Amino acid sequence: MKWKDFSKLIKFRLTFLVVFSASVTFLIGSKATGQPINWLHWGMLIAGGFLVTGAANCFNEIIEKDLDKLMKRTKDRPIPAGHMTTGQALILGLGMALAGTYLLGYLNLPTGILSVFSILFYAFAYTPLKRISPIAVFVGAIPGALPPLIGYVAGYGTIDEIALIVFGIQFVWQFPHFWAIAWVLDDDYKLAGFRLLPTGKRDAGSAVLTFISTLILLPVSLLPTFYHYGGYWVGGVSLACGLVFLYLATLLLIKRDIISARRVMFASFFYLPVVQLMFLFDFLGK
């Protein structure tokens, strides 16, 4: 098996972003305990998170193998392209799931339980819903927002207000992020019958809901400062990023074109790591 096929099977770039998010919040959670950071556990989180996320993506591609053949963006994935059998992918997925869950469960029980939940919810709830209803984005936002929660709990040991805040920020962020992607890729998605835009098409309704979700993200991203977990400069950076994000969502609302949606999509890629890193740097400086 070639690395190129394996990286497509596990959606390497998506997996990397997920692990990055979890690794940042692990450091925040570790710092919140007042104890020295356990770098061995940080490494175990990264390895376990990579395996668990890769497994979830692997199961997703097994379930959607026939649909992937229909879309230009996905027809060269290893299973639809014939570079890997479903059985081979299943063995890989199960192996990664078991190994990743073991590593994360070794850190503490809540982390292990959350990792199992994330695999099941992503592969067996979100994935089939994509062809049934736009509510799939809401369902997918739950496992999509679990990585920072898992990372924090792995470092801190339990769920507290900060854990819920990092979960909430990433949960709300999912909506403008995925709706922008769905707007850009709508023609391709329709070939497989996916219904991910809020109204099912590129129209004013989808643009309005994307704008509203970006607007909601503004106060949510300020929660660390509001609850005195982050300094005012963290709130200032979050506010500035949120306003830029909102401005681009406003342009989408006005123009309702693919170019504007693509700008919102790329802005979402930068927004989340910047906000999370500012929160981390503030914690490390205390």
Image (spheres, grey):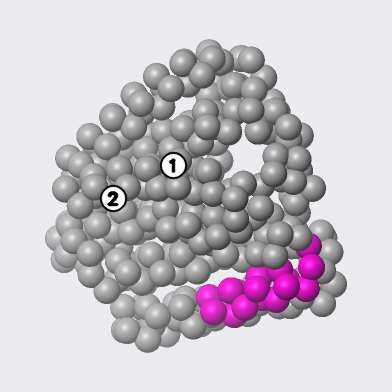
Which callout, 2 or 1, points to the residue nearer the camera?
A: 1
Which residue type does callout 1 highlight? Phe
Q: Residue at image x 30%, y 34%?
A: 100
Provide the secondary structure element on which disc 1 rests: helix
Residue linked to disc 1: 124
Q: Is the residue 277 above or below the residue 62 in the image?
A: below
Closer to the camera in the image, 64 or 226: 64
Give x and y (percent) for residue 49. Answer: 36, 41
| 81 sits to left or right of 184 | left
Q: Is the residue 90 above or below the residue 31 in the image?
A: above
Rendering quarter of residue 248: bottom right
Residue 20 visible here: no
Residue 152 visible here: yes
Magenta-drawn segment: 202-217
Q: Alpha-carbon neighbours of circle 2 within 10 Å: few (<14), some, or many (≥20)?
A: many
Give x and y (percent) for residue 179. Answer: 65, 61
Residue 114 image label: 2
- Where's the C terminus, which quadrant? bottom left
Give x and y (percent) for residue 13. Answer: 56, 41
